[in-house]
Image (spheres, helix red, strand yellow):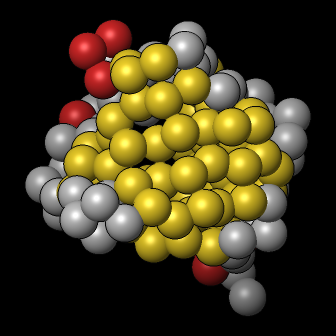
Amino acid sequence: MSDEQAVKIERLPIVDAPVNAAPIPEENVVSGSPEAFAAILWRNEAGTLFNGVWHCTPGSFYLDHADETVALIEGRATVTGPDGVAVELAAGDVGYFPGGQRVLWEVHETVRKAFHMHDAEGKLLGGGDAE
């Protein structure tokens, strides 16, 4: 395999990942003072597919989801979709959020998750221009 064909394997520690602040919009906070942080490990040029890690401290808030698969490494949260069905997610669980849903997150214990997201419209990362 030539150097041009070499595949680079990326590694990012989830628990103590070098994350940046990813504030939850104040109007989405229901209770508490949740603080969110994220790091993008990979994204395509269009900013429509990406993965990384996300940490969030306790509190309740709404998030508008793109298609997202998550794996919780630490913590516990109850997530309630627009249908009113609540699902408990805890360390070791994998969850999927269909795009276009506004989900209530109630973080009981600081959550640390790895995620893969498909944002068909490329809005979350600014069409690949922002991280």
From where the camera sits, is residue 103 visible? yes
The quarter of the picture where the N terminus appears is: bottom right
Q: Position of residue 79 (x, y in %)?
A: 47, 54
Location of residue 15 (image quadrant): top right
Total numbered labels = 0
Q: Nearer the viewer, residue 27 or 8?
A: 27
Q: Residue at x 47, y 42 (%)?
A: 105
From where the camera sits, is residue 69 visible? no
Q: Position of residue 58 (x, y in %)?
A: 65, 27
Q: Residue at x 67, y 26 (%)?
A: 57
Q: Nearer the viewer, residue 77 or 100?
A: 77
Q: Nearer the viewer, residue 23 or 77?
A: 77
Q: Position of residue 56 (x, y in %)?
A: 63, 31
The outermost residue toward the left is 121
Is residue 16 rendered to the left or right of residue 65? right
The quarter of the picture where the C terminus appears is: top left
Q: Residue at x 69, y 37 (%)?
A: 108
Q: Nearer the viewer, residue 4 or 95?
A: 95
Is residue 47 rendered to the left or right of residue 16? left
Q: Residue at x 26, y 15 (%)?
A: 27
Q: Position of residue 87 (x, y in %)?
A: 52, 65
